[in-house]
Amino acid sequence: MTQLILEQALNGLQFGLMLFLLAAGLTLVFGIMDMVNLSHGSLYMGGAYFGAAAAQASGSFLVGVVVAMLGMAAVGVILEVLLLRRLYLRDHLAQVLATFALILIANDAVRMIWGPQPLLLNPPAALAGPVELFGFIYPAYRLLIIGVGLAVAVFLYLLISHTRAGMWVRAGAANREMAETLGVNVRQLFTIIFALGAALAAAAGVLLGPLLAVQVGMGENILILAFVVIVIGGIGSIRGALLGSLLVGIVDTLGRALLPTLLRATTAPEVAAHLGPALASIMIYLLMAGMLFWRPQGLFPARA
Amino acid sequence: MKEVRPATRIEVALLVAAAVLPLILQALGEDYHIGFATRLLIFALAATGLNFIVGYGGMVAFGHAAFFGIGAYAVALMMTAGIFSAWITWPVAVAAAALAALLIGAVSLRTRGVYFIMITLAFAQMIYYSVISLEFAGGDDGLSLEQRSTLAPLDLANDATLYWVTLALLSICLIALKRLAASRYGRALTGVRQNETRMAALGYPVQHIKLVCFVVGSAVAGLAGALLANQNGMASPSQLYWTQSGMLLVMVILGGVGQRFGGMLGAIALLGLEEVLGRVTEHSHFYVGLALLAVVLFAPRGLAGLWTRQK
Amino acid sequence: MNTLLGIAGLKRHFGGLWATNGVDLEVAAGEIHALIGPNGAGKTTLIHLISGALLPDAGTLQFAGTDITRRSTHDRVALGITRSYQITQVFPHLSLLENVRLAVQSRRRDWGSSLRFWRPASADVRMIEEAEERLVRVGLAAAVSQLACDVSHGEQRALELAMALATRPRLLLLDEPMAGMGPEESEHMTRLIASLKNEQTVLLVEHDMDIVFRLADRVSVLVSGRIIASGTPSFVREHPAVRSAYLGDEL
């Protein structure tokens, strides 16, 4: 039992950190540009495909990661300059329509290039096996993801809180007009933020590739989870995105693993069989709805 | 006698044309298309319900699929319990959607703006995941209908009859929408959309007015869901998924937010384009997406806005 | 004196600041009662407390014999307290006529609920007629079919007054109705408010002393969250505490 809980907690941490990579860009775009971007999941999918293709071609997982991040950053810049910057001042409906259109385009574009079959992405051979950690067994690759996720979190924290660009970002999230009067080149800043968000989403896509399937539609599911994360954390807040990600990752993973067992111990078996999975899968949405109801600005409101 | 306005004359002409469509298709031996036309009308109905919430009520609801799906599952579940009559199951489907909307709306309407978008999305996802984890609801596979609902004295097993019933319901809904918009309630709703603070200061029960709008629009989706279950022969989880909510919202925006025929136009344009492109390419969504982007950039008021010129 | 609104010991603080610090105030039925005071004295806070937008930390509010201290805005409007805002609050994309008609329609005691879904609102001819009359009375007869966003600021303020009056309030709260107006518009509004004298109870917040002394039957002076004097314009004008605390020695 302890082995199970510990393993699931680590899985939750790992999933949460990947959600963070996705949510970081989304929350900045949402918070600073006031933009509902439904196509963020497509950047994640694009990253997974770029990465899988590059890894297959080069035989190196690392090359896959680098290509995925650079490639999607470039796609992000093109998207931002050609389309999204025209939408910042439009209402949310126009943003929903345009970015939903991007999902349709991205899904079919991937099908055109790589076909309808899922791609195979193997973890680096050196990390394929398990390792022993304080007396219990855990897959080495998942441990690597945890490490990378933590490193990115620290990097983003330093970037946002200790650099000039980070100060601009924080100023932009708190008050956009104010940032503009401070002489921040907002246009350029937005492009950079979007590209950074795209690269992080791509990293999440390629890192999760070996664990989940690299397939069309993979972005849709996780996009909503990323929205849950940023709403819980507070729209526009990186700190909130990190905490929200870990909360969602752990609650979701542990809930799925433990709730059915817990219910079986406390209620009739047929009730538990029906209720367990249902309850486990809606828990994070309950969390989000509750948060919106009682504290709509989230854990860390970016706007004063 | 009242004068018949030209706009009304066009509407009547369109209705007649829509009514004789199945006869023409049958004469041409293209019966398959009757089913497709029915699908268009069903989505037009669901999108019209959503347009009432988004365009008339000013609430960007991102969970319309939940009510659409609830209508479908209500019909399918009652059929597994041996109840086939549409006279019973369709009103129950509408009532179930309305009840769900009442509960969800009462909570969600405490929030506004993007938070309303997100909380309606959250509730719709809860319903999606609940349904797919329920065994008696068919889980991931959904529920197949043994047969279509019975609607004595009509025979819904006949494709054309189902089409006509759908057309009649859509027409009633559009006429009701016209009346509703001009009624005291409709005027008050317009006031709420334009300036909620002012309406509250005038003593209007703003939350009630919005909740009624949310429930009515969602109930219409429930009816559309009941029809779709009959047309598809099943209630499927994909009908409840958030991308379906997105599709319905896209239809409304495409057609024209707050325009009476906006939902209908958007549904017909989107599904029609998908169907036509589907004939020539495997990747119809790619081109549909491009067309939608063109609409966002060049026709910000939607298709209805292209020929209803307003200030 | 027949008291319509009675306020006793009203307090409200924000953080460490007591914006309202023990206000006692009586507004008599039928009078135009002006509330004056320097910036930051807590005038708008007091209006919020009376309209129900804020709830007090201590003290009571009596309206026509009913304790309304904890009542919602909605209840207070139903009891007959209507307010206007410092910032114009109209329905921008509706005609002036529809703006006022909505205000008329809000009177449930006359027409019943607004949750009526089938009969066209245009069939209620009396509502439209009343709305027209009210627009005529505030000098907007020529603009009834224009959209509210297309008329001038002064006309929007007059529209707001017509809307507030259309709810047939027993007490009308006017929060700086002349804010942002030019001299001519301001004069027009002053005459409109003057025309309400003896038929409408008004609590008026206003900066311009000339206007206050022209319109008001009684004046109360709010300084640092307290009423320091209350009485006829001449009484207040001569009150030593008012002169030193607020008016300075200019008058």
Image (cartoon, coloured by chain):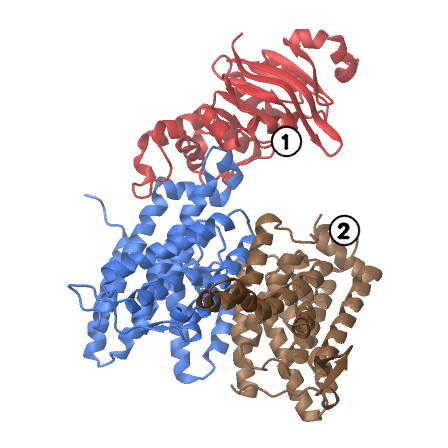
Chain A tint in image: brown
x and y, in percent, of residue B7 in the image: 30, 54
Label 2 chain ID? A
Count all numbered tags in the image, as a single digit.
Answer: 2
Disc 1 and disc 2 on one polypeptide chain: no
Quadrant including the C terminus of chain C: top right
Q: In this view, does A38 lie above or below B103?
A: below
Q: In this view, does A240 lie to the left or right of A253?
A: right
Q: State the hue of chain C.
A: red
Give the chain letter for blue. B
Amino acid at the residue labelled 1: Gly
Q: How much space separates mark 1 and mark 2, taking CA atoms? A: 26 Å
| Chain hosting mark 1 | C
Q: In which quarter of the image is the N terminus of chain C?
A: top right
| Residue nearer the viewer, A138 or A239 | A138
What secondary structure is marked by label 2?
helix
